[in-house]
Amino acid sequence: MTVPSDTNRSGPYNGNGVTTVFDYGFKITNENYIKVIKADAAGVETVLTIDADYVVSDVGNPAGGQVALTVALPVGQTLTMIPSVPFTQEIDLENQGAYYAQTVEDALDLSVMRDQQLQEQVNRAVTIPASEDPAQLDGLVGDILRLADSAGNIDIVANNIADVNTAADNMAAIIAAPAQAAAASASAAAADTSESFARKWATEAEDVAVNDGVNPAGFSAFHWMRKALGYASSASASAIAAAASAASIALPAIVASTFLQAKADASGYETKTPAEVRNALAAAAFVADRTAAKALDPSKDKAFTIYGEGGRNGRFIYVLTSSLSATEQGYAAADTSEGIYFTNGLYTAVRQDVVAMDVKWWGATGAPGNAAGADTAGVQAAYNAASLRPSATLVFSAGNFRCNQINCTQSGSYMEVTAKGGIISHDQVDAPLFRWAAAANGLNFHDLNIISTVARSGYVNAAFHFTVSCGGSTFENINYVGDTVPHSGSAFWTVLSATGACDTITFRNNVVRVSDMGYGIGYGSAVWFYGGRVLGLYNYPTWQAGPQTTGVQFFGGQGGVVNHGMDTIDCYRAWWQSEVNGQLNREFFITQGFMDGSYYGILIQDTQSYTNIVGCWAHSCHEACIYFDCSSDLATLTISGGIIGNAGVGGAVSGAASGLVKTAKGRIHLTGVTIRDNRYRGIDYRGNTSTFYDTIVDCKIYNNGAAIANSTQVALVGNVEFKRNSVRNPAGGAPNLVQDAATKTSMRIANNDGLSGFALVTDPAIGATGVAVTNNTGFDAMLYIAGGAVFECYVNGTIAYNFNGGAARGTLMVKAGDTFTIAYTTVPTIDFYYL
C-alpha cells in the first residue's frame, strides 16, 4: 500500500451531546497509532484511552476511518485526532536474505506517517522567516515574555479597541495637540486675535477644515463628534440588517437526534438522521450484535461493524440480494446459522475480509466450561458453509471446541481445516468425530489438536472415518490423544473395511494414541506415511492386559504404500497387511520404520504382496517381530539392514517370542540384517512349502534362544539358502541351527561363520593342475574364480575359459555330479555358491 494523502490531523469536531462517531482522514497501520484529544470549554486537553474511551475502525485504509467514542462528546467540548506513530524501527533486513517488497514498503509507509506527524506539530509551532538570523530568537523570546508580563494591560487595550482605533486614526491630531496648546499659551497676548480660530477648532462644522495659519490644518472637535455618532449609527444599522437576514433563513422544526444539511437547491436546510449522515459520509455503523444490525435501515446504513457478539464480531456490508450472483445467493440461503450472510428485507449482509473461515462465526465458542458437544452445531454449520465453496479454509481459533459427530460433505475441489490455537474435543461415545458418507477428495487437515474425552471402541468411531473413499488428501501434524489413558480414541483414521477406497493420501507427522486402530486403509494405491507415531494400549510387559490395538491395517487391494520413519508402538498388531475385503495387495515399502512393544510387529497375511523393508527396527514384540503368513508363493518379503530383536522381552512362552516367523508359502530374502536377543528363536520357520528358495545372506545372528524348550538361534524348513551369515553366541545353551529333518536335503547352507551341531556342505577340494574334480555336494554350484596364473578351465571336459597363464576372473556353472578341471601354474581363489 501507499500513503497517497498528506492529511495529518482531523478536527477539531464540536460536541453536541449526541454524536459518538468521528472521522479521521489519514492512514494508520495500527489502532494504537492515533492520538484522540478531547478539549473542554476552557481549552484543557485530555488524551483519551483506546478501548476504555474509544475504538478505531478501518486500520490500514489509505483514506482513513472512524473513531467511535464510548460516550457522546458533550456540548462545548471538542475532539481532535492526530497521528501518533512510534519513533522506532524494528525491521531487520539480513544481508543476502530474502527480499520481500511488502516489508520494505510497509517500513517506508511508516516513515512517511511519522514525517506527517512531525509536520503536524511544526504547523502548530511559532517560526521565523527563512531569511531571518536564528540568533535573533533570544530577543524574540524576550519580547514575548515581556508581552506576557503585560498581559493585563494588553487586555484593557483589547477591551477598548474601538477607542484605540479612533485614536490611531487621529494620531496626527493627538500628537499635534500639545504643540497647539503650547502655541496657545505662548500666544496669550494674541488671544483676542485668535479667539475666532479657537472657536473654529471647537465648533467648526463637520467636514470643514480649520487652518489658523500657525498650526497644521485639521478638523474641529464638533467634526469628530459627528463622525463618532455616524460610526455608531452605521454599526447599529449593520446589526439590525444582520438580525433581519438571520430571521429570513427558513429552518425546519427541531427534531431530536438529527442534523441540519443545506438543501441541494440552496433554498434552505433540512434535517438528516444519523443513519442518513453516515450513509452520506460513507461511514460504518457500530452495532452490538446481529439483532441490532437487522434493526438498521439497509438502504441507508450500508456498512456496519458488529463489536459485541464474541467470535461473530466483524465488518459487514448490506447489498441488494438480487445483485448477488446465483452462486453467492446459494451460499447465503444455505447459511442459516448466519456466519457470513444474513438477510434484512431485500438486502443481504455479507461479511467482509473472508480469507479463512472461523468456526466461531457460526456460533461455536470454544469457551471454557462448555458442556460436552456444546459446539457441535456451530462447527457443523461452519463445515457445511466451507464445503460448498470450490476452495475453502476452515479455522479453529483459540478455544476448546466440544464436538459430537460432524457430518462432512464436499462440493468443492479443495478443503483445508486447521487450527490457530484451538483444540477439538471428541465427546461422542459411539460415533466418529468427522464422518464422510460420500466420496471425499482434496482434503488438507493439518496442525490440529484433538482430545478424546470418553472411552470408545470400534474402528468406525475414529477421529476421521470415510464410508466410501478418500483421495488426493493430506493429514499432517495432527495430535489425537485422550485426556486420560482410558479415554484414548478408539481409532484415528479409517475407511469401511469391506468397501472403503484410499488413493493418493499423505499422512505426515501425526501422533495418535488409540485403543482400537491407528489407520485403517482400504483398497487403492499411493498411500504415504512420513514420520509420526501410533501408540496403542496393548500394555507392555503385561501382554494380555490391554485391548488388541492395531497400529496400521491394510484391508486389501492396496499398493504403492510407503512408510518412511513412522513409529508404531504398544499395539497388538503394529503393521498388518491383510486382505479382509477379498482384494489382493501389491507393493509396500518400509524404510527406517519403528515397530516396537507389540504382540506382532509386522504381520503379513496376504496372497501376493511385495514388501520391501530397509533399515527398520522391529523389536520387543511378544509373538513375533515380523510374522510372514502368506497363502501363495507370489508373496515376497525383502529385508535389507535393520534390526530384528528382543522378541519376548515381556515374558516368553513356548512357541512364541521369535524375531522372524514364516508359516507356509511366499519368498523371503534377508540381506545384512541383525537378528539378536530373541527369547525363543531368531529365525523361526514353522512351515515352508514354497517351491522357490528363500535367501538369508550376510546377516548377523546372535544371542537368540533361552532356557525354553526347542529354542534355537535359527530353525529352517524347506527350500532355504543360508550363506555367509555369522551365527554366534546362542543364549541359554540353545543350538545355532535346527533343520527340519524331512526337508533338510533341499537346504543350501554354506560359508556361515560359527555354525555347529549339524553337517555343513563341504566345498570340493581343488585338485592338482589339470586334474578333474567332481561336484559331489548334491547341489548345483556357481564357482567364482579369481587371481592365480591360470590357463584353461573345463566343465565335463569342455573348455569354458582360457586365461593364457594370466590372472583368472570368471564363473563356472557346475551342476551336482559334474566335473570341473583347472590348469594353472599358481592356484587361483575359488568361492562356491550353491543354487
Image (cartoon, helix red, strand yellow):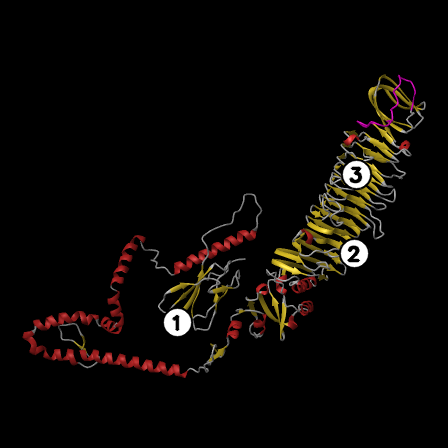
Q: Earlier in the sequence, mark 2 or mark 3?
A: 2
Kindly identify which residue carries mark 1. 76
Q: Amino acid at mark 1?
A: Gly
Q: Which residue is mark 2?
A: 496
Q: Is residue 780 magenta?
A: no
**Secondary structure beneath label 3:** strand
User: Image quadrant for the C terminus?
Assistant: top right
Viewer can see residue 478: no
Q: Which residues are magenta?
A: 751-774
| Residue 130 relative to residue 100: left or right | left
Badge 2 marks a residue whose secondary structure is loop
Q: How many marks?
A: 3
Dividing the image into 4 quarters, which one contains the N terminus? bottom right
Cα–Cα span, label 3 and label 1: 93 Å
Measured as percent of width and height from the top left, residue 55 is found at 50, 64
Q: Quadrant of residue 84?
A: bottom left
Mark 2 residue crowding within 10 angstroms, few (<14) / some (14–19) / many (20+): some
